[in-house]
Structures are given as structure tokens and as C-alpha cells.
Amino acid sequence: VNSKPLRLVLLASGNGSNAENLMSYAREHDDVEVVGLLSDNPEAFALQRAQRNQVPTAVVSAKGKSAQIREAEMIEQINHWKADWLCLCGYMRLLSQDFLSKFPLESTGLSRVLNIHPALLPAFPGLDGYGQAFDAGVKLAGATVHLVDAGMDTGPIVLQKAFERRDHDSLETFKARGLEHEYQLYREALDLIRHGRLQPQKKGSSWYVCTHSTT
Ligand code: GAR
């Protein structure tokens, strides 16, 4: 067991059910702590969820400021919280390479920033992954946890979980089942980090994340 808990900062723009899942996860594991939740949206329900969980919150809105200033304010807050990892939980903005380089993952050139995306990347990046997949009539949908780079949902994939679309699914039932898979997947990704089992390897010109599965 680590003597120093893993310090997570959550970034959320909206409802925050993934943030809630990670706050529950931290309560269940002595070696993980959610040390803050940062939002770009003062109306985000995620902020109320954090307050209910006694997690400190901050808002850095984008209104009337350049991306550079916004990111500088975010970095100051995140450093104040002394984050080990950032976990994006429905955070709907891109982060610049300059921002990401402030949170280096060893000497890989990657960052200690995770995102969860509602599709089997590289399919359906961007907004409304479930809606895109549903409308495309996929039989197999899923969620992805990946390391964040400066692109839109393009960073190295850490874990994916697939689920089937059922014939009687509405977009609502499809999404709801997807979210349940997201919660499980984000927990598994944090298990990997806690156990030192998230190891990116450069293969040719791209990254592959080894997770040391025992099979
Ligand atoms: C989740 O489905 C998450 O995967 C998605 O937004 C939703 C947020 O729900 N994220 C993205 O689309 C990021 N590109 P939540 O606020 O209840 O966690």
C-alpha cells in the first residue's frame, strides 16, 4: 500500500456523474483522494456533487478571456491542489500542448491526464459519441479511457469496454447502459494507475499502453 495517496483533480463541465463515480471510488480506496473539482461552467451540477462530497471546487470560466489566460488560471489552481493526475469527466474543452506539458508522465512526452469518451475510439470522436453511434446504427458500442493529448479524443488508448446495442434500445436506454460501462471502466483505469500498471510504450511512431493483463 502506498503511503502517499494518489491525488486526483477532476475536470467537469456538466452533470458530473463520472465525477461522482470517481469520488465514490476514492472513498472506497484509502490510497486515492479527490483533492478538487474544477469546472469551466459555474452552473455545472458537478460542482454541487463535489460540495456534497466535501471536495473543494473552483470555476475557471472561459468568458471574456483568452485560452492562454484560462489555462494559466487552471494550472495555478491545479498546482495549489497538488494533483498527481487529472481526470476529465465530461469536460468539454480541448487542452493545449502547453497546458498538458505542465503535467508530464515521466519522460514520455505524454501527460498525467485521463479522459473518458462515450465511444470506441477512434470511432465517433467529438461531441455526443452515443448519439453519433446510435444514429450510425452500430451493433457494438462502447467507451474509451485514454491519455489526453492536444487533439480531439486522439490520445493513446488505455482501456475500452464494449456493449451491444439492443433492438429495442432508444437513445436513452442506450446511453444509460453506456454510462454504467463508463463508471466501471474509469475505475479499472484508476486501478491500473494505483498498481503502477499503466505503461505507455512507443511502437513505431505511435503509443501503445500496456496494462500488464495477467492472461
Ligand atoms: C459522458 O458520457 C462522457 O463520456 C462524455 O460526456 C458525458 C458526461 O457525463 N464525455 C465526452 O463526450 C467528452 N468528449 P457526466 O457529466 O454525467 O459524467
Image (spheres, grey):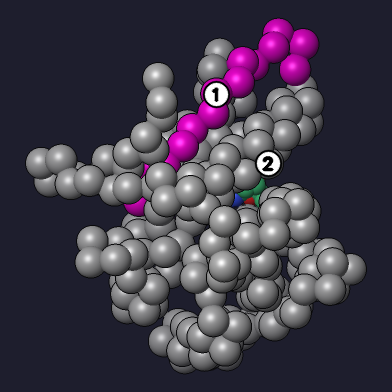
Q: Residue at x 42, y 64 (%)?
A: 112
Q: Amino acid at mark 2?
A: Tyr
Image mark for residue 162: 1
Compared across the picture, whether 138 is left or right of 33 comes to left
Image mark for residue 30: none
Q: 10 Å neighbourhood of mark 2: few (<14), some, or many (≥20)?
A: some
Q: Residue at x 67, y 66 (%)?
A: 33
Give me the C-alpha separation between circle 1 and circle 2.
13 Å
Residue 170: horizontal and vertical position, in percent? 76, 22
- Whether the magenta-drawn stretch holds residue 75 is answered as no
Q: Residue 121 versus residue 129: which sits nearer the camera?
A: 121
Would residue 136 be seen by someone viewing this image from the given angle? Answer: yes
In the figure, 159 relative to 171: above or below?
Answer: below
- Kindly report which numbered mark, 1 or 2, lies closer to the viewer in this rendering: 2
- The single residue placed furthest to the top in the displayed view is 167
Q: Please tell me which of labels 1 and 2 falls first in the chain.
A: 1
Residue 176: horizontal and vertical position, in percent? 76, 33
**Which residue position holds label 2?**
183
Q: Residue at x 55, y 50 (%)?
A: 190
Q: Amino acid at mark 1?
A: Ala
Compared across the picture, whether 127 is left or right of 184 comes to left
Image quadrant of residue 158?
top left
Q: Residue at x 39, y 47 (%)?
A: 198
Residue 11: horizontal and vertical position, in percent? 61, 67
